Image (cartoon, grey):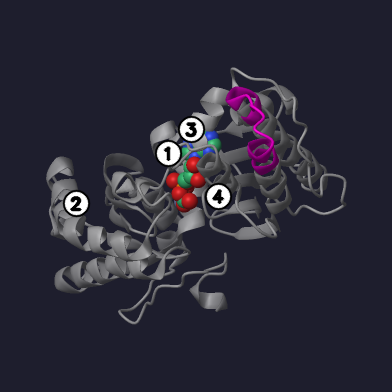
Amino acid sequence: MTEKIFLAIESSCDETSVAILRDKQLVTNVIASQVSSHQRFGGVVPEVASRHHVEVITRCIEEALAEADVTPKDLTGVAVTYGPGLVGALLVGLAAAKAFAWAHGLPLIPVNHMAGHLMAAQAVKDLTYPLLALLVSGGHTELVYVEKPGDYKIIGETRDDAVGEAYDKVGRVMGLPYPAGRQIDELARQGQDVYHFPRAMIKEDNLDFSFSGLKSAFINLHHNAQQKEEELVLEDLCASFQAAVLDILAAKLAKALQQYPVKTLVLAGGVAANQGLRQRLAADLPAELDLIVPPLRLCGDNAGMIAYAAELEYAKGNLADLALNAKSSLAFDYLESE
Ligand code: KG4
Ligand code: ZN
């Protein structure tokens, strides 16, 4: 069997990334982060993101090929994130991938960003199916059932804010720099759950999430305290917010596991970097369940995860032509079901 080598491109938000997967091993994963350019705005500015992607994408591709010591003619295919994400940002990666694929006569492999987050777990070990995944990022909060490789079914999702978005919004209220998730996680470890924020939909018999009520309760508490000139303890605020988030995630996950009694659980996406969440799940989950969390560098947006997902799409024969377009709210249906 000849060796398969994939080049993958990710540009759905504020990271421009190019990776090369060789014989199922990630040999390079170049990540150019723009986060410092967005920090002063307190969130990602789409126009600024697109412009940065344009500036660095070619260099990232060249760097990845050089680092992996691979030439275009060695490649099996070119994979690219085509959604979900910021449309302008996605288009930059798509244009680069299409041009590269066309110039070198390579197949183009369309990849869903969330499938990428999930498949980052493949870096830990060969995944066994069926499995469940809890995908938690700045844009998404989803429970996904995967019966067989590449067959993703959403069984629960947020009805309003994504969990990472809630972290970033309450972080902004507390004056923390964007993105605030990691700092809230650190501060939470030094505080107590004294404010007892609501745990929305926790008792409801479905697998969906809601975080906007929690966010509003947090903002109201902060606002009222400011008006009354009362001091709030930052560490306790963070601990209380995080305790509510963890209770919600843990409760819905327990429900999902009852309905889908799998042996493998993947926790992935930017918020999977959360130490409190990792500890909580490790403590709560039955010992026989295999909890797989990608290494930290593969939790945030990166092209390595796109390369892992691309390998499955390629094996399924899911290829795109040059008409492939960006889909900002792409769901988990692939081309054939669209
Ligand atoms: O997956 P990701 O890199 O980008 C998206 O596709 O959204 O996720 C970024 C999100 C941000 O909202 C960030 O605040 C959050 O992940 N995040 C965390 C932690 N590290 C990053 N949230 C909670 N705890 C963390 N340690
Ligand atoms: Zn992401």
User: Which numbered dot is residue 113?
Assistant: none
Number of marks in the image?
A: 4
Query: Which residue sits furthest bottom?
Result: 323
> Of the numbered discs in the image, which one, if any, rests on residue 182?
3
Q: Quadrant of residue 25?
A: top left
Task: State how far apart marks 1 and 3 are (Cα).
Answer: 10 Å
The part of the chain drawn in magenta is 222-237
Q: Amino acid at mark 2?
A: Cys
For mark 1, give the secondary structure: loop
Could you tell me the amino acid type at mark 4?
Glu
According to the picture, the residue beneath numbered tag 4 turns out to be 165
At a point 44% along the width and 53% down the height, the residue shown is: 309
Local crowd size for mark 2, using a 10 Å CA cut-off: few (<14), some (14–19), many (≥20):
many
Residue wearing tag 2: 60
Q: Is residue 229 above or below residue 44?
A: above
The answer to which of 141 and 333 lies nearer the viewer is 141
* Residue 22 at least partly seen: no
Determine if residue 179 is in view.
yes
Distance from mark 3 CB to nearest ligand 1 atom below 8 Å: yes
Q: Main secondary structure of the magenta part?
A: helix
Label 2 CB sits under 8 Å from any ligand 1 atom: no
Badge 4 residue CB within 8 Å of ligand 1: yes
* Contact flag, marks 3 and 4 (Cβ < 8 Å): no
Circle nearer the N terminus (2, 1): 2
